[in-house]
Image: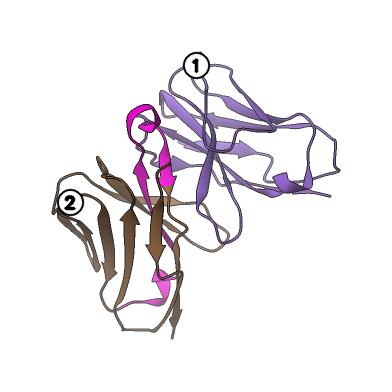
Chain colours: A purple, B brown
Amino acid sequence: NAGVTQTPKFQVLKTGQSMTLQCAQDMNHNSMYWYRQDPGMGLRLIYYSASEGTTDKGEVPNGYNVSRLNKREFSLRLESAAPSQTSVYFCASSEFLATVRHFGDGTRLSIL
Amino acid sequence: GQQVMQIPQYQHVQEGEDFTTYCNSSTTLSNIQWYKQRPGGHPVFLIQLVKSGEVKKQKRLTFQFGEAKKNSSLHITATQTTDVGTYFCAGPGSGAGSYQLTFGKGTKLSVIP
């Protein structure tokens, strides 16, 4: 039972490049989330998906897009990476909305 | 929008001393959740408090939810080096934002052996 799996764990991009962060959960949870964490900050919600087929913006959605591919998978895409998007990204899942109990190990993303 | 504030930002304690972190919300919360994050790790869910005035204990950790449901605290008795990490509180928004958790900035605990 892997829980929430994120790939990749580390990535370095150049400004303007695009990439997709992958997330999968094996707990049959309805809700999935993408957060970013910057030094000295708490986690800030980028996007969330209450259930398969739905996505909604969180606190800091600009510059990102998401896809809820199926119940297991929720991906985050940076279309044109900017240095301000250098951060640690966490995917999470939960059985109930706004009760987040399971986080992935994170993706450490640096944009030069 | 909703704000969740935590104090202190940092706390250094001698091993064996007690530790408390406080969480205050600008709005009344339906519940509050606490997490621990070890250095380089991911947040780990500790507990959810729902009822006004609720107190819950997990071994040396005591969690309290205020009577007005706008504040909460986490108290660790006799800290150990394994308690090192950052402790976050988080609460759901209200109305249209009720599906979103707002996290505090956390209290980073260092334990001196």
Q: Nearer the viewer, residue A110 or B5?
A: B5
Q: Is residue A52 above or below residue A33?
A: above
- Name the residue at 25% across, 75% down: B77
Q: Which residue is mark 1?
A: A54
Residue B92 visible in rendering: yes
Q: Residue tagged by mark 2?
A: B68
Give the magenta-colored segment's residue range: B79-102
Mark 2 or 1, which is nearer the eye?
2
Q: On the picture, is A75 further left or further right than B84?
A: right
Measured as percent of width and height from the top left, residue A60 is found at 58, 38
Query: Where the N terminus of chain B falls, by quadrant?
Result: top left
| Secondary element type, mark 1 | loop
Determine if residue A2 is in view.
no
Indicate the amino acid at tag 1.
Thr
Could you say which quadrant of the image residue B113 lies in? bottom left
Q: Is residue B3 left or right of residue A68?
A: left
Q: Residues within 10 Å of mark 1 (few under 14, many from 20)?
A: few
Q: Position of residue B57 (x, y in %)?
A: 19, 60
Q: Label 2 marks which chain's residue?
A: B
